[in-house]
Image (cartoon, rainbow, N blue to C red):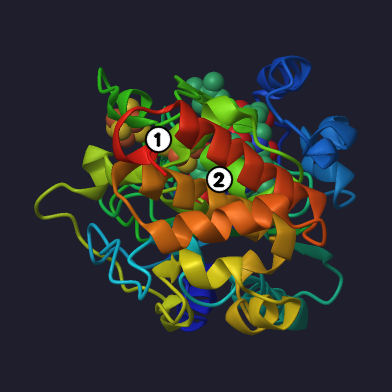
Amino acid sequence: MVIELAESLGFALCGIADARPSDYADQLRDWLAAGKHGQMRYLADHAAARADPASLLDHARSIVAVADFYPTQPAAPPISPAPSGAAGRIARYAWGDDYHKTIKKRLFALADALRERHPDAAFRCVVDTAPIPEREHAARAGLGWVGKHTLLIHPRHGSWMLIGLVLTTLELNPSERMGWPARTAPPADHCGTCTRCIDACPTGCITPYSVDASRCISYLTIEHRSLIDGSLHEPMGDWVAGCDVCQEVCPHNQREGREALPMHPAYAPRPPAPTVDLGEVLGWTEDDRRAAFTRSALKRIKLDMFKRNALIAAGNHLSRRDDPGLRQRIEQIAADADEPALVRETAQQVLMRLLRQPGPAGRR
Ligand code: B12
Ligand code: SF4
Ligand code: SF4
């Protein structure tokens, strides 16, 4: 019944797990102790709560896990054309509507439908922000396994998915599954000896089953609020919002015959996705940022952070080819006392790096 409800609400996958504590509380503690969370203090603040679903909902017995799939095509999005010739890439999960809202609305509908049948039960809907390891519970519910890059991968449908959970005091039947008809146990780890994500990660931040978030491009572009260490600029490449490299190289997202599950229509790409014009972003006002990111998960990237990201990508563009107009714009920003410190100082970092480089990048 839960599965049918989830299907009717347009979720691509749904499964049920017992609401038991995390098996990986020690890993989380070690990860935090090593400072791998960077500036994401909320992860450290709620570490104890994160380990036990009962901290989010008293007497939680079951967890319903659901997933939406987002665009998998084109396989390699065009990096141009941008009017200035310099483009920055946006990660696929953020090409369309904000998944927090898209998923949460339907989780509430799922919980409401269950509440009608079970008025004494309690429910708590979570997407992303609550202290709970969503991937671990979704894996237990049979939606996939946690890969070496730490993302949940469905053996037939890959990893281009976003997850939501409903915690409930109801005792639900854990063997009830959708998108997973033939099995009743969570899928085994199919990473085997593969190390493609580890080898391809531009900043080298993946060790098997752990990501040093403080060096992950997704964190740097979306969560990190201050200057980005110069040593990470070049590896950041064209990314200005998130990063998809570890998923793009994963064989489970590429295999011939992989069954593409229908993408939820809310995630259909709309401008400015999949790329932004870096020259334009450097001239954005707060209103431009708001207009570009209305209904998008990227709203959380502040204007000065997004310009910082665009400057770094512009520096990488200039290290490959001459673009006097773009370079002049960076020089203006570096010297403009009215620019926010984060933007001005990033422009200075970028120019310093270009000056140190031989070839077209170093030329003025
Ligand atoms: C903080 C966060 C980030 C951080 C840190 C990422 C990380 N790897 O921890 C940053 C900003 C870097 C990030 C990036 C991205 N994120 Co994010 N992120 C989160 C968030 C909010 C918390 C994750 C967390 O607690 N991390 C701390 C680590 C230590 O915990 P953990 O990895 O969850 O692992 C625990 C268990 O899973 C367990 N575990 C489970 N199985 C196994 C197996 C083994 C062998 C071991 C050792 C451990 C283990 O160990 C841990 C201890 O509790 C979750 C939502 C949520 N509440 O879970 C989304 C979430 C993980 N992110 C998501 C997405 C889509 C992304 C990006 C793809 C976005 C992008 N394109 O840029 C990237 C991917 C980067 C990557 N390779 O992980 C999705 C993942 C969907 C999926 N298919 O798995 C989530 C679930 C959001 C959602 N609601 O859909 N993210
Ligand atoms: S999202 Fe990018 S930087 Fe982060 S772990 Fe994956 S490949 Fe590495
Ligand atoms: S690229 Fe290979 S090691 Fe990494 S998650 Fe995919 S299968 Fe696992």
Q: Count of labels shown?
A: 2
Q: Nearer the viewer, residue 187 or 205?
A: 205
Q: Which residue is denoted by mark 1 in the rendering?
A: 362
Label 2 secondary element: helix
Q: Is residue 6 left or right of residue 70?
A: right
Q: Is mark 1 within 8 Å of ligand 2?
A: no
Q: Amino acid at mark 2?
A: Ser
Label 2 crowd bin: few (<14), some (14–19), many (20+), radius 10 Å: some
Q: Nearer the viewer, residue 347 or 120?
A: 347
Of marks 2 and 1, which one's residue comes earlier in the chain? 2
* Foreground tag (2 vs 1): 1
Q: Amino acid at mark 1?
A: Gly
Residue 319 visible here: yes
In the picture shown, does residue 46 fall above or below 64?
above
Numbered tag placed on residue 218 in the rendering: 2
Instruction: Name which residue lies at 74% across and 57% down.
Output: 336
Instruction: Name which residue lies at 87% across and 71% down.
Output: 120
What's the distance in space between the residues labelled 2 and 1, CA to CA? 28 Å
The reply to whether the C-beta atoms of the residues labelled 2 and 1 are less than 8 Å apart is no
Residue 146 horizontal/vertical position (percent): 46, 35
**The quarter of the picture showing ligand 1:** top right
Q: Work out which residue is located at the far front of the displayed protein and give it.
A: 364
Q: Is mark 2 within 8 Å of ligand 1?
A: yes
Label 1 secondary element: loop
Q: Nearer the viewer, residue 317 or 144?
A: 317
Q: Nearer the viewer, residue 273 or 353?
A: 353
Instruction: Name which residue lies at 44% across and 32% down.
Output: 149
Residue 139 visible here: no
